[in-house]
Image (cartoon, rainbow, N blue to C red):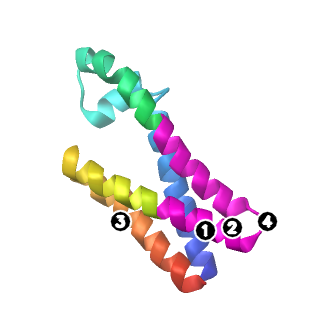
Amino acid sequence: MHLLATVLVILVLLIHVYIVLLETVLFRTRGRKVFGLNAEKVEIMAPAMSNQGCYNGFLAAALAVGLLHPVAAIGYAFVVFGLICVAVAGVWGAVTVQKRILYVQTVPALAALAATVLAR
C-alpha cells in the first residue's frame, strides 16, 4: 500500500507542476488553449493566473518536501497537509470556475490522501 500511496502523491505533484507551467510560463500559448480563452482575455488574466500558478507551485512544493523529507513523521505531515490543500483548492475551483477541476484536482488528491493514510 505504501508504494501505491507514493505513486498517487507523485501523480498529484506532477499534475500541479503541469498546472504551474500552464498558469505561468505557458499561459499565453498552451494555457490559452486549455482554458479556452481568446487573446484579449489572456492578456487581461495573465497577471492573476501567474499569481495563481505561484500558489499551485506551493502545493507541489509541500508534496515534494513530504516525499523527500528524511524524517518520516514530518514527511507524512507535509504530504497530508499538501493533499488536503489540493483537495480544498479543487473543490473551490469547481464551485467558482469549472466543475472539471473537481475531477482533475480533488479526486486524485483524495485518492492519494486515502492511500497515504491507509499506508500508515
Figure quadrant of residue 7: bottom right
Vertical side of 44 occupied by 17: above or below = below
State the CA–CA distance, disc 3 to disc 1. 20 Å
Region of the chain picked out in magenta, as a range: 54-83
**Residue placed most toward the observer, 25 or 34:** 25
Q: What kind of secondary structure does the magenta stretch mostly adopt?
A: helix
| Image quarter in which the N terminus is found | bottom right
Q: Earlier in the sequence, mark 4 or mark 3?
A: 4
Q: Amino acid at mark 1?
A: Ala
Which residue carries the number 2 mark? 74
Could you say where residue 38 lies in the image, as x and y percent from the top left?
A: 23, 21
Q: Nearer the viewer, mark 1 or mark 4?
A: 1
State the CA–CA distance, disc 1 to disc 4. 12 Å
Residue 70: mark: 4
Name the residue: 44% across, 64% down. Answer: 84
Which residue carries the number 1 mark? 77
Q: Amino acid at mark 2?
A: Ile
Which residue carries the number 3 mark? 107
Secondary structure beneath label 4: loop
Q: Nearer the viewer, mark 3 or mark 1?
A: 1
State the CA–CA distance, disc 1 to disc 2. 5 Å
State the CA–CA distance, disc 4 to disc 3. 28 Å
Q: Earlier in the sequence, mark 3 or mark 2?
A: 2
Figure quadrant of residue 23: top left
Q: Nearer the viewer, mark 4 or mark 2?
A: 2
Q: Earlier in the sequence, mark 1 or mark 4?
A: 4
